[in-house]
Image (cartoon, grey):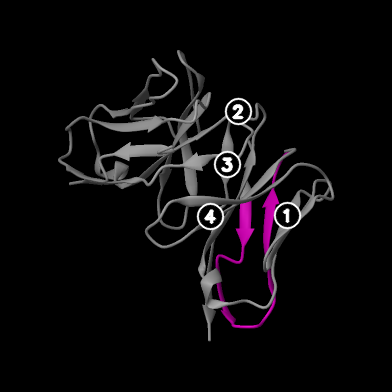
Amino acid sequence: NAGVTQTPKFQVLKTGQSMTLQCAQDMNHEYMSWYRQDPGMGLRLIHYSVGAGITDQGEVPNGYNVSRSTTEDFPLRLLSAAPSQTSVYFCASSYLGRDTQYFGPGTRLLVL
Amino acid sequence: ELKVEQNPLFLSMQEGKNYTIYCNYSTTSDRLYWYRQDPGKSLESLFVLLSNGAVKQEGRLMASLDTKARLSTLHITAAVHDLSATYFCAATGYNNNDMRFGAGTRLTVKP
């Protein structure tokens, strides 16, 4: 099992550009989530999904979109990047939302 | 809204000493999680505490949960350098799908 994979590992964007952060898991987990990690603030939940076709907002959803067309994939879209979105992004998955989550390696995003 | 607070945020310890990290949460939550993060790495699950009075131990780390006080502790016994990392606690919100993390405790163990 590859576990949770994320691409790219590092990305530089200019303000206003769009991009998609990819996340995939091969553990047949129903629950997937996206977090951002900023210094001194822990991890903050952006969006989550409890199964294919079902998504919901977390603590800091503004500026981000998600969709879940398959159990395996949960991409995160930045429609118009802003410097405030400079962060490390982690994708995670678990059988259910209340179970221990398995985290991907993270994507470092720099918005200039 | 569920809020999770950890203290201390920074902790420098001598090898061989004991110390405790505290995690308070603001509203009812029936599960409490502890994760470890090494610098530049992802998060690794340490413990899941499922009920009041739960205690779990792994090596030099022991976690406990008091749901009445809304408090979890992570106790470090006879610290060693390999324990240097950032430790996060987390709790799930009202629908068990909305996980909230504390700000993390950066632990440095010095020889």
**A46 horizontally vs B6: left or right:** left
Report the predominant secondary structure element of the magenta stretch: strand
- Whole-percent x, y for residue B20 in the image: 69, 68
Which image quadrant is residue A96 in? top right
Kindly report the distance in space between the C-alpha atoms of the residues bearing marks 1 and 4.
Answer: 14 Å
In depth, the one of A50 and A19 nearer the eye is A50
Kindly report the distance in space between the C-alpha atoms of the residues bearing marks 2 and 1.
Answer: 22 Å
Subunit under mark 4: B
Residue at the spot 40% in from the left edge and 56% down from the top edge: B41
Subunit under mark 1: B
Q: Which residue is mark 1?
A: B72
- Whole-percent x, y for residue A55 in the image: 47, 19
Picture disc at residue A20: none
Picture disc at residue B103: 4
For the residue carrying disc 3, how many other residues have a C-alpha within 10 Å: few (<14), some (14-19), or many (20+)? many
Name which residue type carries label 3: Arg
Kindly report the distance in space between the C-alpha atoms of the residues bearing marks 3 and 2.
Answer: 16 Å
| Disc 2 versus disc 1: nearer the observer | 2
- Whole-percent x, y for residue A89 in the image: 37, 43
Name which residue type carries label 4: Ala
Residues at marks 3 and 4, common chain? yes
**B93 horizontally vs A74: left or right:** right
Picture disc at residue B100: 3
Residues at marks 2 and 4, common chain? no
Q: Which residue is mark 2?
A: A96
Q: Which residues are magenta?
A: B5-27
| Disc 2 versus disc 4: nearer the observer | 2
Residue at the spot 76% in from the left edge and 48% down from the top edge: B70
Q: For the residues labelled 3 and 2, say whether their Cβ atoms are less than 8 Å apart.
A: no
Subunit under mark 3: B
Q: Secondary structure at mark 2?
A: loop
